[in-house]
Image (tube, grey):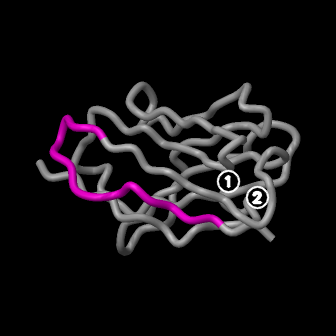
Amino acid sequence: QVQLVESGGGLARAGGSLRVSCVASGRTIRSYAMGWFRQTPGKEREFVAAISWSGGSTYYADSVKGRFTISREDAKNTVYLQMNSLKAYDTAVYYCAAAPGPGPAPTAGLEYDYWGQGTQVTVSS
């Protein structure tokens, strides 16, 4: 079992930055691909970014490409999502997820086995 806890969400102005973190416990994340998803009320959860188990490959939704960066620090069992040039439509609950590796990090939520509880990110325009 892998437990995931997100932190770092909050309020930011449009054009600003935030970094959200996801700390894992129970198992090392070294053999897991890690992803970030987000959800707003009334909408389905959507893919944001993912990083392969090796850290060698990253994937981004078109809506965040060039603005968000996913990274991992396996020694700390932690994954990060750096969010720059924030826009009002980035407002959502952000979820961290883990999928068994190896191979490319999946972009479909159903391929992830473990999920965190989420952290709220609110961007004011």
Q: Amino acid at mark 2?
A: Glu
Decide which of 6, 62 is in the foreground and name it: 6
Residue at (80, 44) in percent of width and height = 30
Count of numbered marks: 2
Instruction: Determine if the magenta segment contains residue 79.
Output: no
Q: Residue furthest left?
A: 125
Q: Position of residue 93 (x, y in %)?
A: 40, 64
The reply to whether the C-beta atoms of the residues labelled 2 and 1 are less than 8 Å apart is yes
User: Which SS class for mark 1?
Assistant: loop
> Residue 106: horizontal and vertical position, in percent?
72, 46
* Marker disc for residue 12: none
Residue 111 circle label: 2
Image: magenta residue range: 4-17
Residue at image position (16%, 45%) is 13
In the image, 95 versus 88, the foreground residue is 95
Q: Is residue 8 magenta?
A: yes
Frontmost residue, 26 versus 109: 26
In the picture, measured across the screen, residue 39 lies left or right of residue 102, that is left
- Vertical position of residue 9 compared to residue 118: above or below: above
Name the residue that disc number 1 marks: 108
The kind of residue on which mark 1 rests is Ala
Q: Name which residue lies at 50% across and 51% down.
A: 21
Judge the density around disc 2: few (<14), some (14-19), many (≥20) Cα neighbours within 10 Å: few
Above or below for 85 versus 46: above
